[in-house]
Amino acid sequence: MTSAATKVFVGMSGGVDSSLSAALLKEQGYDVTGVYMKNWSQDLPGMKCPWAEDLADAKRVAVQLGIDFKVFDFEQEYRDKVVQYMIDEYTIGRTPNPDIMCNQEVKFKLFLETALENGADMIATGHYARVDNGRLLKAKDDNKDQTYFLYRVTEEALSKTLFPLGDFRKPEVRQMAEERGLTTAGKKESMGICFVGQVGIRDFLSQYVETVPGDIVDKQSQKAIGQHDGAIFYTLGQRHGLNVGGGLPYYVVGKDMSRNIVYVSQNIEDESIWRRKVTLQNIHWIGEKPKDDIQLQVRIRHRAPLVAAKLQDRTLELQESQRAVTPGQSVVLYHGDECVGGGIVAE
RNA sequence: UGGGGUGUCGCCAAGUGGUAAGGCACCGGAUUUUGGUUCCGGCAUUCGGGGGUUCGAAUCCCUCCACCCCAG
C-alpha cells in the first residue's frame, strides 16, 4: 500500500512532538487525520486542567496542516483503566506508573481500535521510539527515548503504528516545528501524569484516597522522628517532603502499610534500597520471550542508565545493584537497540 | 541542694576579640510524558536574657534563666 492510500490517525496532544509528527506524515504523503484523545478534563486543586487548551492547540495545528481532525472521548475508560489502577496501587503501598498503563490500555489499544473502526489503517504518535516489523526500537535520540513507557504495547499494535520522530533528536524536532510555523513549536515540554498535567501526585491522590497521619520512623534508631500525612504519598528513595532534618538527608527506605509507618534512614548505603535481584510480575514480551540466561540490558526507571542483567524465570539478576527499585514501578528489558518487554517490580 | 556540662536559623553544627561556615529541612527554579532522584538559587543585622570590659564580643567578666549529667 502506498502512503497516499494509507490512512493514518495521529494522536495529537497539543504539544510540539505530536504536532510535528502530524506534519511529517502529511509531507510523506499519508492520508492523515489528527485525533485528540480526551482522557481527562477535571480540574484539580491548585490546577486547572489544560485539556481545553491542549485541544485548541491540537485543532489549530490540524487546521494549519489542512488535515481532518477528530476528538475521541476516552474519559470513562481512562478513569477505569488508568486512574483506578493508579489509586489501587498507591492504596496498597506500591508506586505505579500510570503512563505505562495509559499506553497499554488507552493509546495503543483503545485508540488503535477506535481508529481502525473509523477507517484508519494505522495510528501514529509523537513518541520518541522506532518500530521495525512490529519490533520496538530505541529512539535515535538517546536522551529522549521513550520506549520505557511503551514496553507493554503489543506486537500487533506496533505493527500498525508509526513513530515519525524516532529518527530525530529533540532540538531538530523543535527546529522543524519552527520552520513549519507550527503554533505549538514553542510549547513547553509536558510533564507530570500524561493528560492530567502538572499536578502533584499528592494533590491528585488526596482527591480519591482517605489518608491517616502516621509516624516517620528512623530505621536505625527505631525512633519516631516525625509525622507523615499518609504513607501512600511516600515512595522508596524519596528524600523531600518528609519534613525531618538534621545532619544528613533522610531517605525513605521502606513502608509498613498495615502499621502506617514510613521508615527513613540517613544511611545512603541502606541495604533495603539497593538491590541486585528483582522479582518481576506481569511480565510482558513484545515478541517471543527471549531465552533464559540471555544477556539483557535493563532500565529500572525512565532515563536511568542501562544495566546488564539476566532474567531467570521471574527473577532478574542485575550486574550492578540499583538504587530504589520500587514495587509497582517497571523494569524494561532491552536487547541491543530493541526493547523486548519488561515487568513490574513485585513485593 | 552540692559538683560538672550545655544553651548559635525549625533540626544538626562550625566559630575562643575583628565584625555569624557548612549540612538537613523548608521555599523557588532547572532537568524529567510516572513516583522518585539529581542540579541551581534563596534562607540568622544575629548568637538563652540582662548588664559590663573594649575602637570592636557569639567569643572576656558579672548576673539571671533553661536544659542535661553525676552525686545525695
Image: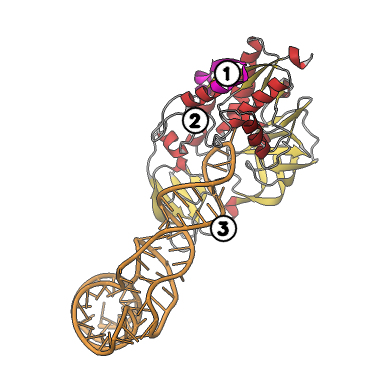
Give the colour scheme shown.
secondary structure
Secondary structure at numbered mark 2: loop
Residue drawn at x 52%, y 31% as measured from the top left = A86
Instruction: Please provide percent x and percent y for residue A166.
Output: 71, 32
Give the foreground label among 1 and 2. Answer: 1
Instruction: Please provide percent x and percent y for residue A31.
Output: 69, 15
Q: Label 1, on which residue?
A: A63
How far apart marks 3 and 2 lie (CA) works out to 33 Å
Choose top left, top right, bottom left or bottom right for residue A113. top right
Relative horizontal placement of residue B42, taking residue A101 as reference (left or right): left
Q: Amino acid at mark 1?
A: Val
Instruction: Please provide percent x and percent y for residue A128.
Output: 67, 33
Region rendered in magenta:
A60-80
Q: In this view of the protein, which residue sits in the foreground, A11 or A310?
A: A11
Q: Label 3, on which residue?
A: A268
Mark 3 or mark 1, which is nearer the start of the sequence? 1
Chain of the residue that carries numbered disc 2 in the rendered image: A
Q: Which mark is drawn over residue A150?
A: none
Q: Please say whether residue A136 is one of the residues in the magenta stretch.
A: no
Q: Label 2, on which residue?
A: A196
